[in-house]
Image (cartoon, helix red, strand yellow):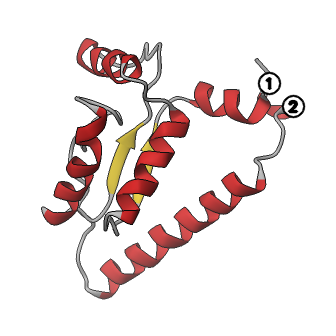
Amino acid sequence: MASLSRARPLPLSLAHTRALSLSRSRTHSDALCHQRRCCWRPPAGPGPAGYPSLEATIPALLALQEGGADIIEVGVPFSDPQADGATIQAANVRAIAQGMSLKKTVETVAAARAAGLKVPVILMGYLNPLLACVTA
């Protein structure tokens, strides 16, 4: 694995996605400040993308939005989440077994956007899958 100092720069599409995501989050948080209210992030979110099934991920994201979530955290499944407990490890294993990956997680969030998801989404996960994408 390449060290962080030798990692290649993000491809333009990833850099653009990051800038767009930061812009969307900033605009959303500015609007919340203007309304003088706090941002509500569901305590658990839907868990890792693809759990409990690939088909349930988009409806779960939309339901969180309908329930009032101001921002949603989506886990990127990882094959060796040692810092997490047994429950999260099992959810990651199940999501990966069903074909979920970093790429598919991003595609799923994009599909949720096409289905009407408007709130900002933060991807949560380990650095290893991202490094594997940008250093390959």
Dot 1: few (<14), some (14–19), or many (≥20) neighbours within 10 Å? Answer: few
Which residue is pictured at 21% across the width and 45% down the height? 43
Quadrant assignment, res 113:
bottom left
Which residue is pictured at 12% across the width and 62% down the height? 67
Type of the residue with mark 2:
Arg
User: Residue 13: image x %, image y %?
Assistant: 70, 56
Give the left or right position of residue 131, taking residue 71 as reference. right
* Residue pointed to by mark 1: 3
User: Residue 28: image x %, image y %?
Assistant: 39, 75
Measure the C-alpha gap from mark 2 to mark 1: 5 Å
Q: Which of 123 and 107 is in front in this view?
A: 107
Q: Nearer the viewer, residue 98 or 49?
A: 98
Which residue is pictured at 41% across the width and 47% down the height? 108
Give the left or right position of residue 19, taking residue 25 as reference. right
Give the left or right position of residue 126, taking residue 120 as reference. right
User: Residue 121: image x %, image y %?
Assistant: 40, 56
Dot 2: few (<14), some (14–19), or many (≥20) neighbours within 10 Å? Answer: few
Which residue is pictured at 44% across the width and 34% down the height? 76
The answer to whether marks 2 and 1 mark residues whose Cβ atoms lie closer than 8 Å is yes
Residue 68 visible to an observer of this rendering: no
* Residue pointed to by mark 2: 6
Q: Is residue 29 above or below residue 86?
A: below
